Amino acid sequence: MKRILTGSRAFFSGMEGFHPHDSDYIEIVEPKDVDFYYKNCKKEGTDCIFQNVRRPKDKRIRWALKYENPMSLCNFLIPEFAREFNITIEDLETLRPMRDMLDRRHQYLGVIYDAYIANGDFTLTDEQRQTAFDEYTKERTRQ
């Protein structure tokens, strides 16, 4: 089983003003070890664990588009997750429906998604990262 940091910590750790209340992790589990396809969350203290069964990327993408909450787009934006499932920028483009359904609190993921598409790579410039962080903080300080 492999564990990968996801959520806002994966993008904003170390940035001034970033004070998350928990840590989110993806656990990649083998199909032979479980009887589910994707388990949304289990708590371990202040950690949230999202279990993803290792499947071919085309099946993983179809499952996400059909059954997962749009904010799980975050997983596909994590470079280490993308490498584990061989996700490409072209594959990200097929996930646009998830990007388009993000709620206000998760629009920062849309900023990251758009930057990856524009860059043609799973990287952010310092300016793009700051723009995504500004979007993240805006929605968390809104009264």
Image: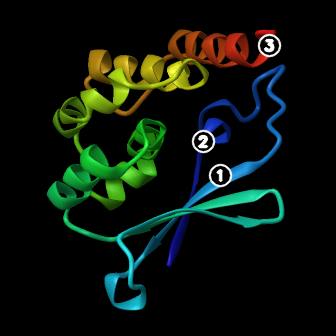
Query: Does 41 sit above or below residue 21?
Result: below
Which of 70 and 111 lies nearest the eye of the viewer?
70
| Residue positioned 80% across, 26% down in the render | 18
Q: Earlier in the sequence, mark 3 or mark 1?
A: 1
User: Distance from label 2 to label 1 (Cα)?
Assistant: 6 Å
Which of 40 and 74 lies nearest the eye of the viewer?
40
Q: Which mark is residue 141?
A: 3
Q: Quadrant of the C terminus?
A: top right
| Residue positioned 46% across, 17% down in the render | 111
Direction from residue 75 to residue 82 in the image, left or right: left
Query: Does 110 sit above or below residue 60?
Result: above
Instruction: Mark 2: give few (<14), some (14-19) or many (20+) Cα within 10 Å.
Output: many
Quick check: can you spot residue 138?
yes
Instruction: Mark 1: give few (<14), some (14-19) or many (20+) Cα within 10 Å.
Output: many
Q: Which residue is mark 1?
A: 24
Percent coordinates x, y for residue 109 in the rendering: 49, 26
Q: Helix, strand, or loop for circle 2?
A: loop
Q: Earlier in the sequence, mark 2 or mark 1?
A: 2
Direction from residue 139 to residue 125 in the image, left or right: left
Q: Helix, strand, or loop for circle 1?
A: strand
Inspect the image, locate mark 1, and give the three-letter code of the amino acid beneath it.
Answer: Asp
The colour scheme of the drawn protein is rainbow
Q: Which mark is residue 7?
A: 2
